[in-house]
Amino acid sequence: MQTDSISGFWVASATPIDADGGVDNALLADHAQWLFEQGCGGLVLFGTSGEGTSFTARERLATVSDLMARGIPAARLSVGAGFPATGDSVAMTQDALAMGLRHVLLLPPYFYRDAAGIEDAFAAILDAVADDRLRAMLYHIPQVSGVPVLPGTVAALRRRYGAVIAGVKDSSGVFADFEAFRRDAPEVPVLIGNEADIGRAAELGGAGTICGLGNVVPGMVRAMFSDPAAADAMRQACALFRGPFVPTLKSTLAAMTGNTAWARTRAPLRPADAALGQRVGEALRSLQNGLA
């Protein structure tokens, strides 16, 4: 399996939470195996869909360790490792590498929102880690993080660190941002987060997707790579998630799997109403059946 850069269809995994508020690793491992059976190439753990900023580095690494012990290969996992403090990002990245992971997803520092200094912040992490095994994906989601990862920053870091800068995840939802990454940093793989843009991103040289709806409709996501007719159904699917995305996604997972444990969230997120998940799940099944 190719490990130098993430490509194709990866899922931004939701994180199931047990009754004590910790990660339900057994349920997550079952979810991973099901996703692999549906054609998913790998999982990104503790990103936005996985409530990553609500979990400590220790919790994230413990989950990675548990999944690997259950037979999930390291090559099919990436983990969110970006923190406001450089030292925290360095320590978690080093620990992930020591466990056998190569892929990490790095949010830019998101409290002091100085886009001009983001190159310095990422460089400080990479210089301190100083490990050529690392394959770092930079995370552009300014509507949530409050700070963009600029195409010029990506290009400059690629020139400095080569293949260690293994990609950028564009979850801005603004297609012009994807086009700017492809234009200004053409050597860097770009994965799209907005499911409705998967097809046209692929036409322009996009490397694939890391997306949240893959948790519930992996077949629809796969279809976006080959079936032009899938785009309209996917736009309808995306429109179902108008409210807070993560609670709605987890409520939908609970409805579609029959496992109410999926509905739990960590503060400050509050669980979505079960009826909402039921409605969204039924609508998604109808859209999937229409494609089939």
Image: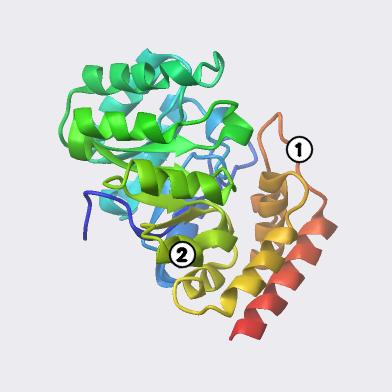
Q: Is residue 27 visible?
A: yes
In x, y percent, where is residue 27? 52, 53
Q: Amino acid at mark 2?
A: Leu
In x, y percent, where is residue 124? 30, 16
* Pointer 2 local density, CA inside 10 Å: few below 14, some 14–19, many at least 20: many
Question: Where, by quadrant of the figure, is residue 274 drawn?
Answer: bottom right
Q: Nearer the viewer, residue 175 or 239?
A: 175
Q: What residue is shown at x 39% (from left), y 17% (from top)?
A: 88
Query: Which of the labelled discs sits on residue 227, or is there none?
Result: none
Please identify the residue farthest to the front as the structure is shown. Answer: 183
- Vertical position of residue 139 compared to residue 257: above or below: above
- Vertical position of residue 158 compared to residue 286: above or below: above
Report helix, strand or loop for mark 1. loop
Residue at the disc numbered 1: 270
Residue at the disc numbered 2: 35
* Pointer 1 local density, CA inside 10 Å: few below 14, some 14–19, many at least 20: some
Lower sequence index among marks 1 and 2: 2
Q: Nearer the viewer, residue 66 or 185?
A: 185
- Vertical position of residue 251 compared to residue 64: above or below: below
Q: What residue is shown at x 36% (from left), y 14% (from top)?
A: 87
Q: Quadrant of the C terminus?
A: bottom right
In x, y percent, where is residue 126? 26, 23
